[in-house]
Image: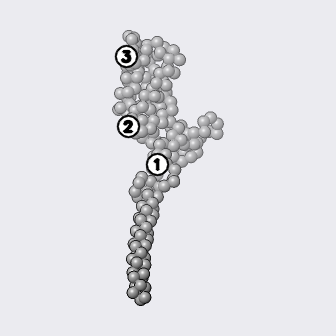
Amino acid sequence: MSEKKDKDAKPKKKGGGMLLKIGAVVALLGAGGGGAYGLVAAGIIGGGGHGSEHEDKNPKLIRKGEEDPYAPVAKEGEHGGEGGGHEVDGEGGSEYRTAYFSFTDDFTSNLKDSDLLVQVSLACSTHRDYRVILWLQKHELAIRSALLTAIADTPGEDVQSAEGKTRLQKRLVATINKVLTDTEGFGGVDAVYFKTFIVQ
């Protein structure tokens, strides 16, 4: 009878050992999976936090009176504007601040299917943060080249009417934004302005 007990006891030990091994494997897998989840959630592996919203890295619209985190800081003793004070926004109009950029040189070009020559001085504006202005400065050469091509592709009759000049302005905005999108991944220019416009 004791032999029978020993035989019965051995398989129980063997089965218990197998359950222990399976339990250990499951515990290791669980710990590994939990560790991997923790690394993914922390953003260490897998490209970011689990469940967190994708942060938009494009230039943000800046409301009037709001601080622009990318704007250059005035050095001590320097004041913005001719009056020597700080920027003051009006209460009406657009809710967003407008920042301007002037191109350093004039643009001179022939016009499409015309003997006319146009010389313009351009500026543009953005309601977004100062990164757009920095990108305009950084890529001014590429933007100038694209703008000259767009101006040269303008029919002569377009520069002689207000409607034609408005169409040209819209095309120039699209041209600038295309260069910025191609180089920085985002445009951000809202309008183009003619500082001078001479047709000969």
Asked whether the viewer can see residue 88, the reply is no
Q: Nearer the viewer, residue 75 or 189?
A: 189
Q: Position of residue 112 (x, y in %)?
A: 39, 14
Marker count (numbered): 3
Estimate how packed mark 1 is, as few (under 14), some (14 to 19) or many (20 or more) residues with alpha carbons within 10 Å.
Answer: few
Mark 2 or mark 3, whichever is nearer to me? 2
- Kind of residue at badge 2: Thr
Give the quarter of the image for residue 39: bottom left
Query: Of helix, strand and loop, which one carries label 3?
Result: strand
- Residues under numbered marks 2 and 3 in contact, where contact means CB atoms less than 8 Å apart: no
Task: Of the two numbered discs 1 and 3 on the same chain, state the one appearing first in sequence.
Answer: 1
Query: Of helix, strand and loop, which one carries label 2?
Result: helix
Asked whether the viewer can see residue 46, the reply is yes
Q: Which residue is mark 2?
A: 183
Mark 1 or mark 3, whichever is nearer to me? 3
Q: Nearer the viewer, residue 89 or 37?
A: 37
Give the quarter of the image for residue 109: top left
Residue 73, numbered label: 1
Estimate how packed mark 2 is, as few (under 14), some (14 to 19) or many (20 or more) residues with alpha carbons within 10 Å.
Answer: few
Residue 171, numbered label: none
- Residues under numbered marks 1 and 3 in contact, where contact means CB atoms less than 8 Å apart: no
Query: Of helix, strand and loop, which one carries label 1?
Result: loop
Estimate how packed mark 3 is, as few (under 14), some (14 to 19) or many (20 or more) residues with alpha carbons within 10 Å.
Answer: many
Q: Residue at (43%, 88%) from the top-left corner? A: 1
Q: Residue furthest bottom?
A: 2
Task: Of the two numbered discs 1 and 2 on the same chain, state the one appearing first in sequence.
Answer: 1
Residue 110, numbered label: 3
Q: Position of residue 187 (x, y in %)?
A: 45, 35
Tell me if residue 66 comes above or below residue 104 in the rendering. below
Task: Of the two numbered discs 2 and 3 on the same chain, state the one appearing first in sequence.
Answer: 3
Q: Residue at (43%, 28%) from the top-left corner? A: 175
